[in-house]
Each structure stands twice: as structure tokens, then as C-alpha cells.
Image (spheres, rainbow, N blue to C red):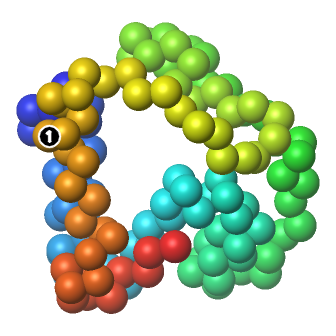
Amino acid sequence: MSRGDGMVGFALNALKEAYFGTHTKNLMLLRYETLTSKPAEAMKAVYDFIGEKPFQHDFDNVEFDADEFDNRLGTPGLHRLGRRVEQKKREMILPPDIFRRYENDNFWNGPGLNTRCVRVV
């Protein structure tokens, strides 16, 4: 999964290429933590980024699932959203050595690395 052609490795490498590439004016990173703790602020930032008027959302009534897609990937429930947008404490399911391998890979949180002024919300 973490190899360059694996599900995690491929996605992480693609994000790095976009973040450090030349087309960053087309890139905005929305942190999970922002979306789940301040959903209205997060969505306002998205609408601002795409140049659209904000839309009023009901963050207490959101439901979505991609069961067919998730099942094909062998990751049932991965893209299933509950009714309410909220930040939930998640139990660590990765072995500690694998978690430690990636815990400092959040390069988007380092202001010194954001040389192309990517919008990170």
C-alpha cells in the first residue's frame, strides 16, 4: 500500500507533485480537521477558492456512501459519512511502526515548505 504504485504511496506522491509543482494556483488543501471541526468555515473557503457564492449547508443532515466503490477496493465503509459533520476521536488501527513511518509526512503543515503559497485550510 505504501509503495509508489500502492493506494497510499501513489496518492501521497501525487499530492507532493501537485504541492511542489508549477500549477499550485489550482490547488487548495482542505484538512480533515478543519472540515470536521469548522465545516462552515471550510466550505466558505472552498467556495471562495472556486469563485462561487457560498451555499447554505445543513451540517446536521449529511449522508453519503460509496459502498460499491469501497467494496471494489476492499475497503468497505471507507467513504461512508454519518448524518452529522463532527470531529470524532478515531482509534488507531495501524501498527505503531507503520504509523511512525508517516507521522511527519504532513509537509503541508510546514510554512517553510509552502514556497508556492498553496492555500491550506
Residue at 20% from the left image edge and 61% from the top image edge: 16
- Which residue bears the numbered disc 1? 101
Q: Is residue 79 left or right of residue 107?
A: right
Question: Which secondary structure, mark 1?
Answer: helix
Tag 1: amino acid: Arg
Q: State the image quarter where residue 88 is shown.
A: top right
Q: Is residue 25 left or right of residue 3?
A: right
Q: Is residue 46 left or right of residue 27?
A: right
The image shows residue 100, relative to residue 70, as above or below, that is below
In the image, residue 68 lies at what x, y percent?
56, 15
* Up/down of 121 relative to 14, above or below: below
Quadrant showing the N terminus: top left
Residue 42 placement: quadrant = bottom right
Picture residue at 59% right of the left edge, 63% below the top: 34
Residue 43 appears in view: no
Q: Residues within 10 Å of mark 1 (few under 14, many from 20)?
A: few
Q: Position of residue 50 (x, y in %)?
A: 59, 77
> Residue 104: x and y, percent?
21, 55
